[in-house]
Image: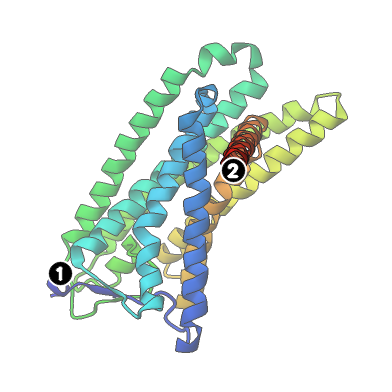
Amino acid sequence: MANHTGFILLGFPGIREKFYTPVSIALFMFYLISLFSNGAVIALILCNRRLYQPMYLVILNLAISDLLFDTITLPKIVARYWSNDGSISFAGCIFQVFSAHFLGAFDSYIFLLMAIDRYVAICKPLRYPSIVTNRRMILLCCCFWLFTAVIGLVIALLDSSIQFCDKNRIPSCYCTNTAVLSLACEDVTVLKRLIFGIAMFVLLLPFAFILFSYGVIIRVIISQTQTDSRRRAFYTCATHLCVIGLYFVPRIFVYVANQVNLFLNEDINVLILCFYTFVPHMANPIIYCLRTKEIRRTLKNLIERRILMRKQNMSVMNTISGLSLQ
């Protein structure tokens, strides 16, 4: 039984050993960028009371989720290529399954909250302060944390209840439901369909509303007469939709492909997995947070304060040195 001996993460199954070091460096850089960018967003929002606004509170939750996801998944696959250690215990693998579906589903609903925020801000600007409040956003985020945790727990419990054969090699960067079910000894068709239904509920419902809300937003933008504001709004919507599309479309494609038994090369499958998982986690802080005026102003003030403090310290040190020489 593989339940007791654990599993082995293969990462990219077809990659040659001479490429292990470049792959490990690339994955490690992904983690460092995610750690720095999402960590910076979390620190900036928590340390600046002026950023205690509904949109930034939602972004804070997104940054926490992405940072947790990458911390749970990336170090293990980096170790697989860095030190040739791809082993993971059965409990560790099931925990990754839980985390992947829990945090992945949470991101879906956070994107939904962002779309609602933008919809109300642009389409109903006069009612925005009364509709979108800090308390309401915090309550919704807490509900989504709880709801998606239940989804991840259900999927993890279903996966842990199946019987495994002597196969324990997982062709993926981290344990996913699809990868774990592929090692089952029993017929898991019903289980696959059940989890596919859950995944489509988690993905399609938010994605449909996001597309609808941005469609309405673009229609409102087109009706604006000011060319500059229209151009900026279009650019913002386009960047948001690119990140959202990068998150949702490949996920839906992979789930549907696995459901209809569409054959995908294992390395291509893993590449798509990394692409729609880790790239958005690096892009989210830049697209949704670091490009905003308030965040840039906060960063500018922080840097200027640091420079001023350094100059003052240098001035004090020079004064002390001058007095000691006298």
Circle 1 packing at 10 Å, graded few (<14), some (14-19), many (20+), is some
Write down the quadrant of residue 166 in the picture: bottom left
Which scheme is used to colour this image of the protein? rainbow
Where is residue 151? Give x, y as percent: 30, 44
Could you tell me the amino acid type at mark 2?
Answer: Ser
**What residue sits 34% from the left and 67% below the top?**
76
Q: Which residue lies under the disc numbered 1?
A: 3
Q: CA distance from mark 1 to mark 2?
A: 68 Å
Q: Residue 276 or 36: which is nearer the viewer?
A: 36
Amino acid carrying mark 1 in the image:
Asn
Q: Position of residue 311 (x, y in %)?
A: 64, 38
Q: Position of residue 256 (x, y in %)?
A: 46, 60
Say which of marks 1 and 2 sits in front: 2
Q: Residue at x 74, y 40 (%)?
A: 235
User: To which quarter of the image does residue 236 belong?
Assistant: top right
Image coordinates for residue 132, horizontal then vertical, percent: 51, 19
Front residue of 23/145: it is: 23
Give the structural element (helix, strand or loop) at label 2.
helix
Residue that badge 2 annotates: 321
Q: How many discs appear?
A: 2
- Quarter of the image with the N terminus is bottom left
In the rendered view, tell whether residue 261 sits above or below residue 94. below
* Circles 1, 2 touching at the beta carbon (< 8 Å): no
39 with respect to 163 (left or right): right
Let me know if residue 26 appears in the view: yes
User: What element does badge 1 sit on?
Assistant: helix
Task: Please report the residue visible at 63 percent of the width from the left and 29 percent of the height from the top.
Answer: 294
First in sequence: mark 1 vs mark 2 = 1
Residue located at (24% from left, 73% from top): 7
Is residue 266 shown above or below 136?
A: below
Q: Is residue 253 visible?
A: no
